[in-house]
Amino acid sequence: MTKIKLCGLSRMQDIETANQLKPDFIGFVFAQKSKRRVSHLKATELKGKLDPAVKAVGVFLDDDLDMVGALMNLGIVDMVQLHGSEDEEYISKLRTITDKPIIKAFIINSAEDVKRAESSTADYILLDGGKGSGKAFDWTLLKDIKRPYFLAGGLNPNNAADAVASLKPYAVDVSTGIETDGIKDAEKMTAFVSAVRKEA
């Protein structure tokens, strides 16, 4: 069964919708330059209302190690997603600060990018078309991948079922594809979850 991550939630109504849909993961974006960024205080408030069965993932972009570790250990997020140029040394150091699972995101443009992702020491890998660009990449590059992965980039309620049927990813990750005018849309969130579960 392909798992579901709804990313970039920032409002209480987003959390309420997530609690009804019960995805496996939701994402709070802490990256400074993101339009979906939430403050630590806001994330704490939202996490307090999140169904405990849903794991909260903190999305970071080349952030200070100690800050990331502190957020993890405060219990604001259950997992960390590194979406920048964080290397193996960064991952290794982060493991000395927290024992929470680590997802490392990779932008896929070639077969070499897939091989690099497969060799990561992170607990999970996420394969994306860009840094939150909402664009899909060439899925045929994944035909020989051996490692379970989160599929991201360009997913929406209309193509989610096809992605799950053809690729059988460990999880699908969506943000832009469940928005209308840059705001999370409850109907699109519901349609996305429904499409994935029907196929999975």
Image: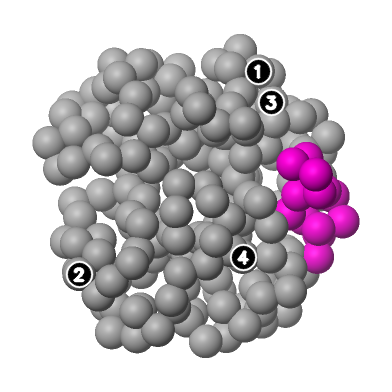
What is the CA distance from the residue labelled 3 to the residue labelled 4? 24 Å
Above or below, comparing residue 152 to residue 1 in the picture: above
Task: Give the residue at mark 2.
Answer: 112
Front disc: 4 or 1: 4
Name the front one of labels 3 and 4: 4
Q: Amino acid at mark 1?
A: Lys
Q: Position of residue 134 (x, y in %)?
A: 58, 55
Count of labels shown?
4
> Where does label 1 land, which residue?
42
Span colored in magenta: 178-191
| Amino acid type, callout 3 | Leu
- 153 to the left or right of 191: left
* Residue 56 sits in quarter: top right
- Counting other residues with Cα less than 10 Å from the Cα at mark 1, is it few (<14), some (14-19), or many (20 or more)? some
* Picture quadrant of residue 24: bottom right
Label 4 environment density (alpha carbons within 10 Å; few <14, some 14–19, many ≥20): many
Earlier residue among tags 2 and 4 = 2
Residue 126, image x, y percentages: 39, 57
Q: Are marks 1 and 3 in contact (CB under 8 Å)?
A: yes
Choose the circle earlier in sequence order: 2 or 3. Answer: 3
Which amino acid type is marked by label 2? Answer: Glu
List the residue tagged with mark 4: 155
Q: Is residue 153 above or below residue 65?
A: below
